[in-house]
Image (spheres, helix red, strand yellow):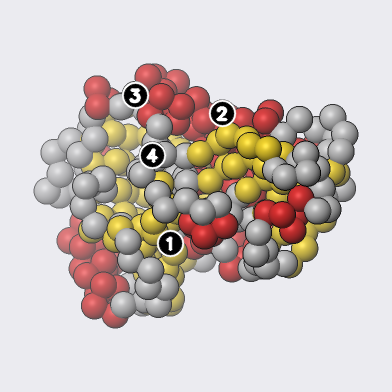
Amino acid sequence: MSGEVIVVGGGVIGLTTAVVLAESGRRVRVWTRESVQETTSAVAGALWWPYRIEPEALVGDWSLATLRVYEKLAERPQETGVRLVAGVHAHVRLGELGPWAAQVEGLRAAGADELPSGYTEGLWARLPLVDMPVHLDWLRRRFEAAGGVVERRTVGSFAEAAAQAPVVVNCTGLGSRELVPDDRLQPVRGQLVLVENPGIEEWFTAADGASEKTAYVFPQPGRLILGGTAEEGDWRTSPDPATADAIVARCARILPELARARIIGHLVGLRPARSTGVRIESEPLPGGGLLVHNYGHGGAGVTVAWGCAQAAAALAS
């Protein structure tokens, strides 16, 4: 393919889409309001798992396509930020999952000795766990190696990009609420606590998709990430001390050694949830341009990034 494309949005969805386009031969620029490390993606936990994302009929294929990429990237964890790490999803049964689960190697019921005290069932798996600051930098380098350019720029309308390129790809996440506009988008606030790792090597989650309060523990290099929250419609971006205390308390009930872990930081991110699910579709722009949408990934942008990027790139021809 040939021709110039402007991707609006510099998070994991925007950068991954830009990589796919640039490596297919397109001339691609990424316009991003924040630096890559200031995007919501940089805050993510980030465990591969289809969580709080629709439409169910498409999510499985997007997730599996992404899983296959991460499995290869995990061969170079220090460079890519992707590692395959073992852990347990509590309160989850294989029969409750979609057909995609049969293609996740090693996914099985957890044994009693693999579950923390107080838990009676769950699933064991070795899944990609992504160190997002490292991964985002790697994505940017890969994009630039393919000839792409990242530009800091605030966009008031897609017409600004269309004036400079015949194809515009919208990967603005929650920003699409105003830019499209799309009032089906709303934030789902996630607060995390970073602590020194007392020696935990496996991840653990006990997440109820219907609850604002979840419990998860993700061991990342140099830190342990404790979560979390899923507060729909909450635009607050500053950490709440009471919420942080509650997160630590929930996680310490699962792993008591966390009660004494030294806190080293707090993070808040706003997941771009869309009531009707991810939007990947194209529409004409005035003057003959093409606008391709790729937004609304909720809490699973990392999980579906490559699958959605490939689907969006196919519409950008």
Q: Amino acid at mark 3?
A: Gly
Which of the 4 image quarters holds residue 60? Answer: top left
| Picture disc at residue 169 | none
Q: Which residue is mark 1?
A: 270
Q: Amino acid at mark 2?
A: Ala
Instruction: Tell me if label 2 and label 1 are in contact, CB under 8 Å.
Output: no
How far apart are the two marked residues, 4 and 2, measured between alpha carbons?
A: 22 Å
Pick whichever of labels 4 and 2 is earlier in the sequence.
2
Q: Is residue 21 left or right of residue 268?
A: right
Question: In the image, residue 198 lies at what x, y percent?
Answer: 37, 65
Pick whichever of labels 1 and 3 is earlier in the sequence.
3
Q: Which numbered disc, 2 or 1, marks the residue closer to the eye? A: 1
Q: Which numbered disc, 4 or 1, marks the residue closer to the eye? A: 4
Q: Which residue is mark 4?
A: 276
Instruction: Tell me if label 3 and label 2 are in contact, CB under 8 Å.
Output: no
Q: Which numbered disc, 4 or 2, marks the residue closer to the eye? A: 4
Q: Which residue is mark 3?
A: 98
As helix, strand or loop, the secondary structure at mark 2 comes to helix
Q: Amino acid at mark 1?
A: Leu
Residue at image location 82% in from the left, 48% down from the top: 165
Q: Which residue is mark 2?
A: 65
Q: Which numbered disc, 1 or 3, marks the residue closer to the eye? A: 1
Q: Amino acid at mark 4?
A: Thr
Q: Residues within 10 Å of mark 1 (few under 14, many from 20)?
A: many
How far apart are the two marked residues, 4 and 3, measured between alpha carbons?
A: 19 Å
Residue at image location 55% in from the left, 36% down from the top: 280
Question: In the image, residue 104 lies at what x, y percent?
Answer: 44, 26
Question: In the image, residue 148 lies at what x, y percent?
Answer: 82, 50
User: Between residues 254 and 131, which one lies in front from this camera angle?
Assistant: 131
Instruction: Tell me if label 4 and label 1 are in contact, CB under 8 Å.
Output: no
How far apart are the two marked residues, 3 and 2, measured between alpha carbons?
A: 15 Å
